[in-house]
Image (cartoon, grey):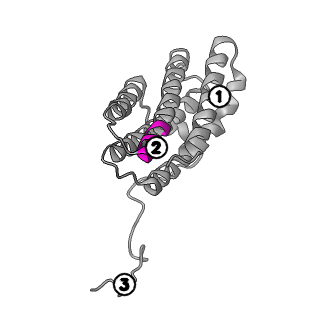
């Protein structure tokens, strides 16, 4: 087959079972985001350390690469603030707290974004950043943040130090997301 030939095939023929033997989430029994795997502080700290280690290896003299590296380091700064805010909030919020689903969703999204930033940093280290792929990978995790954001209403049910910590998380998430949406390269 050469590059000019087009091959068509059915992605899901009628006789193919595509449910992967997993029952879909039915919406009952709590939050969808709360059902996501809980990662925790250690994984977030390790993910952040991976990004920081990769950024520390930057050794470019190319002006455009330097600008991209600086922009990436700014996002890593926001990532650091988010990991710290999540750590402070997680220290106050038990797993059965109404805001646990919100925190779990933000932690899952943060881990995904950390992996994407680390991949971009590795690409920048070899002067081969794939900006479109980076944007696509970020877009693929948008649903996690959207679901977590839907759980923000539970913050109104809290008060005092817990509410302050959760509001700090929401502010940093919003600022970090805005920074991620800005062009980098």
Magenta region: 63-71
Where residue 141 appears, x then y in whole percent? 50, 47
In this rendering, the answer to whether 27 lies above or below 39 is below
Q: Give the residue at mark 1.
A: 171
The residue at 37%/24% (across/down) is 42
Q: Is residue 33 left or right of residue 134?
A: right
Find the distance from the CA under tag 1 to the CA under tag 3: 48 Å
Against 142, residue 46 (above or below) is: above
Q: Main secondary structure of the magenta part?
A: helix
**Residue 68 numbered tag:** 2
Residue at which label 3 appears? 7
Q: Nearer the viewer, residue 1 or 51?
A: 51
- Mark 2 falls on what kind of element? helix
Q: Is residue 68 magenta?
A: yes
Viewer can see residue 5: yes
Label 1 – label 2 distance at C-alpha: 25 Å
Picture coordinates of residue 44, whole percent (x, y): 41, 28
């Amino acid at each position: 087959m050469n590059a000019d030939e087009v091959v068509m095939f059915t992605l899901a023929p009628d006789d193919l079972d595509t449910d992967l033997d997993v029952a879909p989430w039915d919406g009952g029994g709590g939050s969808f985001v709360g059902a996501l795997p809980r990662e925790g502080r250690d994984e977030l700290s390790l993910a952040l350390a991976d990004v920081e280690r990769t950024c520390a290896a930057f050794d470019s003299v190319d002006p455009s690469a330097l600008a991209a590296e600086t922009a990436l380091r700014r996002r890593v700064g926001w990532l650091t603030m988010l990991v710290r805010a999540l750590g402070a909030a997680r220290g106050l919020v038990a797993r059965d707290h109404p805001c646990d689903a919100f925190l779990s969703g933000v932690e899952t999204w943060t881990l995904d974004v950390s992996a994407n930033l680390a991949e971009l940093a590795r690409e920048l280290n070899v002067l081969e950043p794939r900006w479109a792929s980076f944007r696509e990978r970020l877009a693929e995790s948008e649903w996690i943040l959207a679901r977590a954001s839907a759980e923000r209403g539970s913050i109104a049910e809290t008060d005092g130090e817990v509410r302050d910590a959760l509001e700090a998380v929401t502010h940093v998430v919003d600022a970090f997301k805005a920074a991620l949406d800005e062009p980098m390269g």
